[in-house]
Image (tube, rainbow, N blue to C red):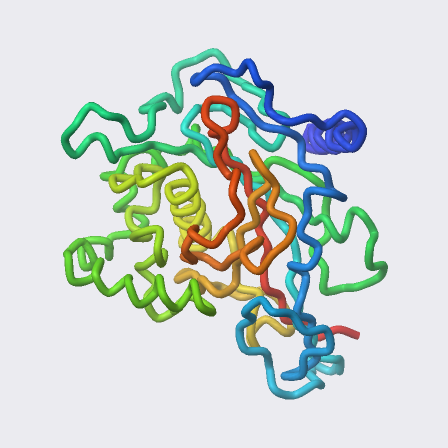
Amino acid sequence: MSSIRAFLVLFTAMLSLVFASPASADAGPGKCTGQFVNPITDICWSCLFPISVGGLEIWPSNRPDPDNPDLPVCLCGLRPGIAMGFWEPVRLADVSMKPWCFVNLGGMKLDPGFDIGFRSISGPSAVGGASQYYSSWHVHWYAYPLIYWMEIVADFLCLEPGSIDILYISEIDPLWQDSELTAIINPEAVLFANPLALAACAADCAASTANLPLDEMFWCAGCQGSMYPMNGNVSASIGHVQASRLVLSRFAYKLHRELVSWGTMGSKGLCGKYLMPVMRKQQYRFQATNPNPATKGRFACPPIGASTTFQSPGQVIPAIGEDMGYLVWRKRNCCAL
């Protein structure tokens, strides 16, 4: 069943190369919108860089890059190799306030027909009071090893293999919708639910915008807000871009906490993935794919927590483009043959 589903998703994605079109103009506020991700034109291919061998950048870039192992050679058991560092597109993510809205699959609404996943479907409103800044989001997580299945690089063992598939749907996860249940996986949240801890996130905001986020401040999502709670409930929602990027950062952290996602960067990642229950924010970049793909510029694929002020315009289109889609880039250090 999984292989059939993967084939159907891949087939529709290939059709989008020819028939891809923007979100329909007649979409109402409650309608799911989006477009298929064109694997050629909607990808920021410069986000692959820099590429390094040891501590030397053999293909430099103006985008910030975390530290790489200093030595150009490495050893995994008895196998020697070259210490490579690069960025790899590995996941797609839908981030929408509308349950069962698959943004990156052309804005399809795949409602199963039973009452699950339905909470607040409205963002910031003008009703007044604290509730006007509240929003609730859902996330769909896809396997998307783009470089591997397009065979851009052949016989490179460092690439994640596989095909397109849907890995995670937040609507069926009770921990994602209830902040009290979420405390099961993030009990330390009570330590950072205070004004002092939140004020300290200003330093992470500045660092992530100018260069890279501060991994030591793991409770911060930079300019977007706090990583806690690890769910889709945003109590300080400024806009769709800020809130959706915050939710996606929390979701990535949640997968690490649940040991679903592992570490791939640094010296520890040279010989394979390793446990990373406290996510290192420097491992990820998020590139917008919907409603308007960000394919060029310094902030096309910013790190977690970077300010949205300098990102390209048109990331939200009222009524016809308020559902967000992202391509997740992951830092990979690998001992290549």
Left of 114 or right of it: where is 83? Answer: right
The x, y position of residue 34, in whole percent, is 58, 28
Identify the residue shown where x is 60% and y is 69%. 62
Judge whether 138 appears above or below 67 on screen.
Answer: above
Left of 65 or right of it: where is 271? Answer: right
Identify the residue shown where x is 34% and y is 24%. 122
The x, y position of residue 96, in whole percent, is 45, 31
Q: How many marks?
A: 0
Left of 110 or right of it: where is 90? Answer: right
For residue 135, which quarter of the picture?
top left
The x, y position of residue 134, in whole percent, is 26, 34
Judge whether 64 appears above or below 136 on screen.
Answer: below
Task: Tell which of 70 and 115 is nearer to you.
Answer: 70
The x, y position of residue 204, in whole percent, is 34, 65
Identify the residue shown where x is 59% and y is 64%. 331
Judge whether 261 appears above or below 314 on screen.
Answer: below
Identify the residue shown where x is 75% and y is 29%. 16
User: Which quarter of the figure is the C terminus placed in?
Assistant: bottom right
Task: Tell which of 303 and 232 is nearer to you.
Answer: 303
Judged from this view, the residue extending furthest toward the top is 113
User: Which quarter of the figure is the N terminus placed in?
Assistant: top right
